[in-house]
Image: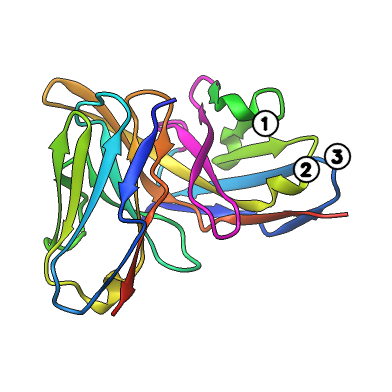
Amino acid sequence: QVQLVQSGAEMKKPGASVKVSCKASGYNVTIYSIHWVRQAPGQGLHWVGSLYPNDDTTDYARGFQGRVTLTSDTSVNSVFMELSSLRSDDTAIYYCARRRSGVIAGQHITWLDAWGQGTLVTVSS
Amino acid sequence: DIQMTQSPSSLSASVGDRVTVTCRASQMISTYLNWYQQRPGKAPKLLVYAASKLQSGVPSRFSGSGSGTDFTLTINSLQAEDFATYYCQQTYRTPTFGQGTKVEIK
């Protein structure tokens, strides 16, 4: 059974950094990309970035460039998201999700088929 | 970035109703469109991928359609557990989500 289990809630001060972990079970984390999505309180979903643990290829959303770093430790089947220079508007739930893909009607389609439970990051002075 | 606009933002319906949620992309995205359900306090759950492919284990009352810029998620015979917020997501370019449609009990 595929599961993604994230680390617990964090409370940080403005300007600090936070590192959230996402541990995969039921499959080898090197096989599929892991994406990160955040959700501010009462708001919608926003893509943060992605990491392919097999070769550490990363892709980041424009709004997070330079502040977010995605890494992996395949020895513990885990991926990590570090967000620096935290601001109050970074307060949100951060989700990791596994990306699957397939060729459908000649097109390479991707989707997020398994999600972690989410990690609440609160930024407050 | 490609903008995804869902309508309505919220709707009220009764158990047994047929519900339709629409999603419009700001440019052509072929069938690079997924639908997710999010219940309160829970992580999103994949319902439909590639615009019309039902994810394994998802009840057949859910269906997706569309291509290009206009897409639809339909729930036939709404059940109590379907009251949730639904999001579309495009993966044609840098992934973006719609703002969500909250399905509430009438």
Q: Is residue B6 left or right of residue A44?
A: left
Disc on res. A15:
3
Which residue sits at x=77%, y=35%?
A84
**Which quadrant holds the C terminus of chain B?**
bottom left
Mark 1 packing: few (<14 Cα in 10 Å), some, or many (20+)? Answer: some
Which residue sits at x=36%, y=56%?
B9
Measured Cα–Cα span from mark 1 to mark 3: 13 Å
Q: Amino acid at mark 3?
A: Gly
Looking at the picture, how far across and down is residue B51, in whole percent?
Answer: 19, 40
* Secondary structure of the residue carrying numbered label 2: loop
- Identify the magenta region: A29-57
Q: Chain of mark 3?
A: A
Looking at the picture, how far across and down is residue B18, in whole percent?
Answer: 13, 67
Does label 1 or label 3 sit earlier along the sequence?
3
Q: Amino acid at mark 2?
A: Arg
In the rendered view, would you say A5 is above or below B61?
above
Mark 3 packing: few (<14 Cα in 10 Å), some, or many (20+)? Answer: few
* Secondary structure of the residue carrying numbered label 1: strand
Looking at the picture, how far across and down is residue A4, in whole percent?
Answer: 49, 51
Q: Is residue B34 left or right of residue A68?
A: left
Mark 2 packing: few (<14 Cα in 10 Å), some, or many (20+)? Answer: some
* Secondary structure of the residue carrying numbered label 3: loop
Which residue sits at x=65%, y=24%?
A65
Q: Chain of mark 2?
A: A
Mark 2, residue position: A87
Residues under numbered marks 2 and 1 in contact, where contact means CB atoms less than 8 Å apart: no
Q: Amino acid at mark 1?
A: Val
Mark 1, residue position: A68
**Which quadrant holds the N terminus of chain B?**
top left
Q: Is residue A87 magenta?
A: no
Pick the front one: B5 or B76:
B5
